[in-house]
Image: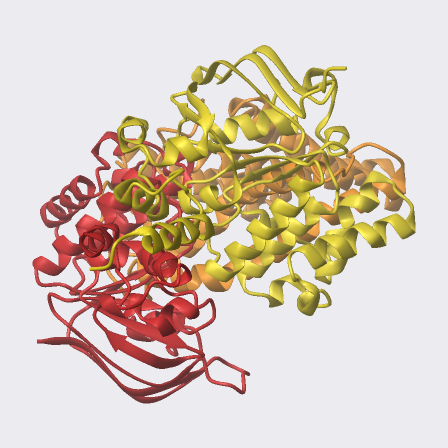
Amino acid sequence: MKSLTLEGATFWYPATESPALREVSLEVAQGEVVALVGALGAGASTLLLVAADLAPRVTGGRLAGAVARRDRSGIVLPTPWTQASGMAFTVWDEVAFGPANLAWPTHEIARQVDRALERLELIPLASRDPTTLSGGELQRVIIAAILAMDPGLVLFDEPAAELDAGGARTLWRLIRLLAKEGKAVLLATSALDALPDVADRVVWLEDGAVRAVGTPDLLADVAACDAGLGTSVATVWRASGLPGPYPLTVAHAVQRWR
Amino acid sequence: MTGRRLHPFTLLAIAAALPALAWILPAPAGGAATAGIGLALAASRGLRRGLWPAVLTAAPFWLFLLLLHDVPTTIAIGLRITTMVASFVWLVAALEPARLVEAMVAAGWSASVAYLLAATLSAVPVLKARAKRIVEAQRCRGLSPRGGIAARLRALRALALPLVLSALHEVDERALALETRGLVPGIHRTPLAPPPDPAVERALRWVLLLACLFALIRRFM
Amino acid sequence: MAVIPALRLDGVSFSYGTLPALADLSFSIAPGERVALLGKNGAGKSTVVRLVAGLERPDEGTVWVGDWDTHDAAPEQLARRVGSVFQHADQQLFASTVRDDVSFGPRALGVGAREVERRTDDAIEDLDLAPHAAHHPYDLPPAFRKLAALAGALALEPALLVLDEPTIGLDGALRGRVTRALLERSAAGVALLVITHDLTFAAETLERGLVLDRGTLACDEPLAGLLGDATRLEPLGLVAPPVAALSAALDLPGRPVRAADAARELARVARGRPGP
């Protein structure tokens, strides 16, 4: 079942002549992880804001084309410190902020918060003051806070930016788990090397338009490598002059090598 | 330390009643009494967080008053302003924004109004933390906090501008970000831990209100 | 004549109040050396940066920046030798154009007007920021503000650059710019100490790895050897970057960790192999 459908979506930010999104058509099904890749300014963040019903409703601007949503969405922005409530004593309270705003009964809030804290391995930090957290810890708290609101469509904008290797690994595993539970996930990331294990489909955005859509194998295409959007392994393979198709991951490379 | 266990509405009531009484009661005795109480409250939050900021903020006003008025008027108005400043400093230090939101929501206020009020009050520590980061970054670029007037003005510009610019820039982002947390107008938030409101405190708030009204009436009789 | 290290920590311990952050930390960095400061979140890396910049003084031990003891120097004095860029540096920008902001550092140091211009121009050039030099910093996307903040540190022309996560929020192309700018400076003798959790960036830009674990030095060795060794990285909470993992998996000679080197070795080995 489709959670999100965009048809020919074109979006202009206020007082801007050229559109940030041009005729974007995209579908994300429940249980699917779709990754948006592209250079900075290609429109991935804007696309997520449109998907979250924040653009143009809150950002202003103009939207042409059709957007259909089946589920409630939750979005994790690339600047987690702006999403912090600023008035929680503890990490637990911070994560409970969103569910409380949804007017859920307290036992339901407690259930969702405890579950979210566990998934993001935040139980040891549950009583900490959010203002004392490091960037990576805060990012995980905000992710937990959005998940605690139990959205059907989960949108991530560079969620691993501030995380260390262990945190990133937990995050990618969690994203696969969310899809398995039937959520639809749309994620913008520059962590290309993680995508073969995380994404079901990859959408390549260029100057606001969809340049290509495919499985993560797309990240081993000649065009992607030349645009700087190939995985590290594919890029090295291409640079070495060896013939394509280029391997996507170390495991693929090892297979090819034999 | 006062304030930590009082209900947020009681804190607001005291912080509002003191300045009100300072202006209503006859000067200079009334102002002196309320200023004394205000400074004592501010001091109860500690020298660094309470008394010192109150004194530092009130001092320039006294200076301006001296330039404009004679001594008795200066004292009368100065004490009133000191009361206002001290009460506000005490309130910001004593009031926990989270508790205020919880109290207002439990009392039936809209969550976004509650949040707006609480965020305004908590803006001070947030800006202070950011100012500290900016001062550090500018010092590491060679900005010296010492020197003559010209140097200090340059230093102030290098601190104030980024503080204001980045804060303003973030306002837009923040409004958007808070929507993502479900903070939209018209919601009825579930209170998570409404602060207890003992009858004694409710009575105290009524007493403060009546005291102000009584003083007001007496003043105009 | 012995060369004075660009940076030396000598038995440094530091606590934030009662919270211990660093314990008996010692290491030194030579001029021109490119060092990655690695470790899990909370290991103490940012504390090291604050101590080197002079924002904190060690409880025990000494931090030497060149031949200056940070105990005796204020951050604005240390700015003559150390260029620091902290996280969220994009919040420190205040001038009305990028160029004005970048020139803030050299002007504060008191060098002559012509010298200020030269240093500013060089810094802007190094990061390809010329097209944006006349823009208001807040009209630029956050990634370019970050580069502007880095340019500000480069313009100080310090002997040591200390950077805290310089590539967060940058895409591949901009990360490449940072790599090129840092390699150029290092070739001119500037020492680098870079906190980063992007091990691919570390592999491309830096040569030596200092790994902190709960405030102590768990490891101090060349990145080339460290990054390809999964058995060493795991207990330190690190994951081998793909190029290093590829080199190890294919057993490429020299186990290169940089993309260009790996491509070259791959081609060489492929040429030498019998056909399929």
Can residue B106 be seen here? The reply is no
Colour displayed for chain A in the image of the structure: red
Figure chain in orange = B
Give whichever of C1, C194 is nearer the camera: C1
Give whichever of B37, B29 is nearer the camera: B37
Q: Quadrant of the N terminus of chain B?
A: top left
In the image: residue A141, left or right of residue A104: right
Q: Which residue is most to the front?
A: C274
In the image: residue C52, left or right of residue A222: right
Figure chain in yellow = C
* Among the 4 quarters of the image, the one containing residue B21: top right
Can residue B137 be seen here? The reply is yes
Please, which colouring scheme is shown? by chain
Give whichever of A171, C195 is nearer the camera: C195
Q: Position of residue B216 (x, y in %)?
A: 56, 47
Where C50 falls versus A130 (above or below)? above
Q: Position of residue C276 (x, y in %)?
A: 20, 60
Give whichever of C26, B10 is nearer the camera: C26
Disc count in the image? 0
Residue depicted at 38% across the width and 39% down the height? C255
Q: Position of residue A243 (x, y in %)?
A: 31, 67
Residue depicted at 31% across the width and 38% down the height? C239
Where C254 falls versus B164 (above or below)? above
In the image: residue A67, left or right of residue C199: left
Q: Position of residue C80 (x, y in %)?
A: 77, 33
